[in-house]
Image (cartoon, rainbow, N blue to C red):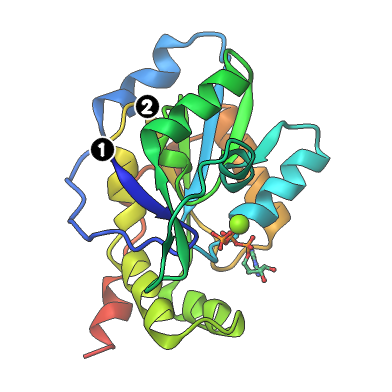
Amino acid sequence: MQIVTLGREIHGGKDAEEGEPASNKSFFNTVGLLRLMRIALTGTPGTGKSSVGDILRNRGWDAVEVSAIAREAGLLKEVDQRRGSYEIDIDELQEAVDSRYHRKEIVLVGHLAHLVSNDLCIVLRCRPKLLRSRLAERGWPEAKVDENVEAEALDAILVEAMEQDGAVFEIDTSDMDSSAVAEVVQDIVAGKTEKYRPGHIDWSSEVLDWY
Ligand SMILES: Nc1ncnc2c1ncn2[C@@H]1O[C@H](COP(=O)(O)OP(=O)(O)OP(=O)(O)O)[C@@H](O)[C@H]1O
Ligand SMILES: [Mg+2]
């Protein structure tokens, strides 16, 4: 059983391995006629997932917030006092998603979406400095802002996503508005993935400025 918190999760840092995962190499080649069943739209809090999800929904996609599924399924249990967030059992979340969206085309939106089995995972990225200002604007405590900015700087969600099955791509959203990001999501789904391979985004120069 894996328990993580929903809302303000910190993701442990681990360097991404070099090279493209086998799943990315094979995915679009083996699926001649692209029929995606489940897309995960994930990223550190504040990277713009819900904003992009809203746009996709307006364009007719079935985009659903993971938090809404968890709430509806009664999975939001104990509150992690330190982080001010709910703990959630990922196995239970997986079951809740599977039972509601079995063989349905869906975009799962949220920072835990990549932990639910999916066919294609898109990680939204944002320059740590910009992310910091967005999270601070939410009035979050400094420690919580720091945790999430550090997680972004360390590629934490990207690394977690790449540890799952399925193809993974990442989008640097820092200089794009949400509708441009939604366009890129559609490009990736259509197979235009070349510019979005995992590993092309590197926040290390910005991190070096912290010291
Ligand atoms: N591409 C963008 N350019 C500028 N501002 C953006 C962009 N995307 C999102 N924002 C702004 O950043 C904030 C966070 O966006 P949003 O709520 O979509 O992020 P999120 O990834 O869903 O966060 P959370 O994981 O906490 O739900 C909002 O104020 C939103 O208006
Ligand atoms: Mg959101």
**Residue 143 percent location from the top left of the image:** 37, 83
The image shows residue 152, relative to residue 102, as above or below, that is below
Q: Which residue is mark 1?
A: 163
129, 89: nearer the viewer: 89
Residue 207, given in percent of the width and then of the height, sits at: 28, 79
Q: Is residue 44 shown above or below 169? A: below
Task: Estimate the x, y position of residue 167 in percent, counting from the top left.
Answer: 39, 30
Residue 117 vs residue 131: left or right?
left
Type of amino acid at the residue the image marks with label 2: Gly
Give the amino acid at mark 1.
Answer: Glu
Quadrant assignment, res 115: top left
Q: Residue at x 58, y 35 (%)?
A: 73
Report helix, strand or loop for mark 2: loop
Q: Residues within 10 Å of mark 1 (few under 14, many from 20)?
A: some
Q: Secondary structure at mark 1?
A: loop
| 166 relative to 89, above or below | above
Residue at screen point 40% across, 71% down:
81
Q: How many marks?
A: 2
With 171 as the anchor, is 149 left or right in this view?
A: left
Q: For residue 166, which numbered disc appears in the image?
A: 2
